[in-house]
Image (tube, helix red, strand yellow):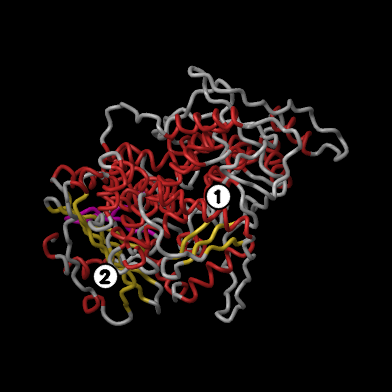
Amino acid sequence: MSQSTNDVLRRAQACLRAGQPQLARPMLAEYVRQFPASEEGWLLLSQAVMEQKQKIDCLQRVLRINPANAEAQTRLRRLLAPPDEPPPTMPPPPRIQPLKPSAPAVAAATTPREPQAESPQPDRPVPPGAPSAQPEVDALRVAAQRTLAAPKSKARLTKSQRIIIGVTALVIVASIGLAFVLVLTSLNRTPGAPAPAAVAALPTATPVFTATPPPSPTERTLPPTWTPTALPAATPTRTATPYPTLNPTTGAQMDKIEQQVADLRGLSSDTAVPRRLIGKMDVESMLRQMLIEEGYLQTLPDLARSLSALGLIKPTYDLTKYAMNGLADNIGGFYIPWLKQLFVIGTSFHGLERFVFSHEYDHALTDQHFNIDQLGVYPDCLSNNQRCAAIKALVEGDATLLMQEWLQQYAGPLDYQDIVRYQPPSQTLPEDYPPPYVSRDLAFPYTAGLEFVQYLHQRGNWATVNKAYTNLPASTEQILHPEKYLADEQPIEVAAPPLTDTLGSGWRLIDDNVLGEWTTYLVLRAGADMAAQLDEKTSLAASRGWGGDHYQVYYNDPISQTVLAAEWVWDTPRDATEFKQALLKYLDERYRGAKLDRASGNCWEANHQTSCLFVKDKRTLWLLAPDSATLEAVLAAYPDFQ
């Protein structure tokens, strides 16, 4: 078994130990498809799936491979036990003790506490005579602050390495806003356990062991053999879903949080924002309707063809949920700039919803002052993808840092108890087997965006962050390397020759865009072909030194074929050489070593595709076409590489 396949099992095991089975499932499902005789793969998958029937199926497969596997025998026996068999006795949850100055953080108790006046929860019963929760919340507040304020590692890594490694590790821990990861890990940590680092390198990082509650037996997941199918089309004439009317108490709490956010952010609240609670069952239909109204659904097939040519998704993957998740914050709510409306997912307004509301109201507040709906990003990207990704990172990093500050300064005891018990999904609309690209790309605005905003905040508080809205980041390189943003290092413009006349009739341009440093990294590290994924160190080094790029994708509907032409320019010839070596390795794995004998360039041919790589000084050209003749015609449009 190769090193890369062993890495998959190690990463999946780390996710399971970190209490994130939803991140291990797609890796393991793909793994057992490729290696159906893997005893360890099926055993790990039995821990990642949620439904009892799926667990039983996985364990039975383990025993068919190795009937003597003791762990599988024991777990299968327990799962098949009669329903009236009493469950094993569990120890009572630990009570929170006041935190001593030198004591480690302790786990939160789950017993109800008397609410403070700071965070009224009138619709939650509090037992008469319940003891005061102040010592406990003080302990939780200190624990959260210690985690949030933990100093960065002093390892001698470049900023690019630290940020991208941090992005990868955080997505493996949970593909949501970094605030949830830090807070939930801190509050769920068992007594005496060491505080986790904010970021960790992969794949050699030691996993953090956290005390997380078992998954709900009613959680619905899809079996390991599931394959994606097209979602049913929604009609534009769907009747609008009514939203629960906010009761006066909830409205008053929202008013108070709005003022708290305004005080923390240093911005006045000048306009009332429509606020809604929306049930989980209504979220998907609402987001789908927004895509229909914006005419975005009809663009998804071409986007899928483009991402498939780049190797980021498989041709059969349905991008609908990816697009819907892109409209919502992965933390449990969303603010729609072009509608000026704020939504929190839930039917009540307790600790978790209050936490989410602070994030979403920060969006509304910054929109009032900096007009984020006019930045050329929402609802459609009006420039290039990587510039829009950079601006989204600024906006989401802003709100994620603000919600951390709100948690530290204003959250009450019941807020903490709700948050510590919450097991967040990896996405607003979870998918059991999303491609690695999807999970990491959706997490980028929250993880890398938080790092970027923190960098600015440390150099001048929120006033410095505010200035970024008048001098927007121009590239994901500036997000990943904030020092380049402050130095005003702009991306190099790369011109792309039109290929319509070159290719002839039947071909149409379906994508004309910029990858940026972030997506260049994802091409190497998070492609749909697991065998072609490069290791973290190689991908980091190869994408660093990005100067600019431009790619274009053409599609021929009658013959269902694609042409891709991607050109990069690098900061130095050494950077170009490093990227060339990495891309050569990626393409050789992607095309399974099927190289062509060509006088210049490096070429492969497989699965009705011809792909070539050319290098000229600090520039790199990657071409993909259905055959050699078409590729030669495209190459002629790039005379510098001949």
Q: Residue furthest front?
A: 117
Left or right of 27 in this view: 303: left
Q: Which residue is mark 1?
A: 354
Give the residue type that dot 1 points to.
Arg
Instruction: Name the foreground residue: 87 vs 582.
Output: 87
Residue drawn at 39 percent across, 33 percent down: 201
Left or right of 617 in this view: 23: right
- The label on residue 630 is 2
Measuring from the top left, give residue 432's x and y in whole percent. 57, 52
Residue drawn at 61 percent across, 39 percent down: 116
- Res 33 visible: no
Extent of the magenta region: 592-606
Measuring from the top left, give residue 143's x and y in whole percent. 50, 29
- Quadrant in the rendering for residue 567: bottom left
Mark positioned earlier in the residue sequence (1 or 2): 1
Measuring from the top left, give residue 384's x and y in whole percent. 28, 64
Query: Counting other residues with Cα less than 10 Å from the Cα at mark 1, is it few (<14), some (14-19), or many (20 or more)?
Result: many
Query: Counting other residues with Cα less than 10 Å from the Cα at mark 2, is it few (<14), some (14-19), or many (20 or more)?
Result: some
> What distance separates the C-alpha of mark 1 from that of mark 2?
57 Å
Measuring from the top left, give residue 320's x and y in whole percent. 50, 65
Give the residue type that dot 2 points to.
Thr
Q: Is residue 462 above or below residue 631?
A: above
- Quadrant in the rendering for residue 130: top right
Residue drawn at 30 percent across, 39 percent down: 538
Badge nearest the viewer, 1 or 2: 1
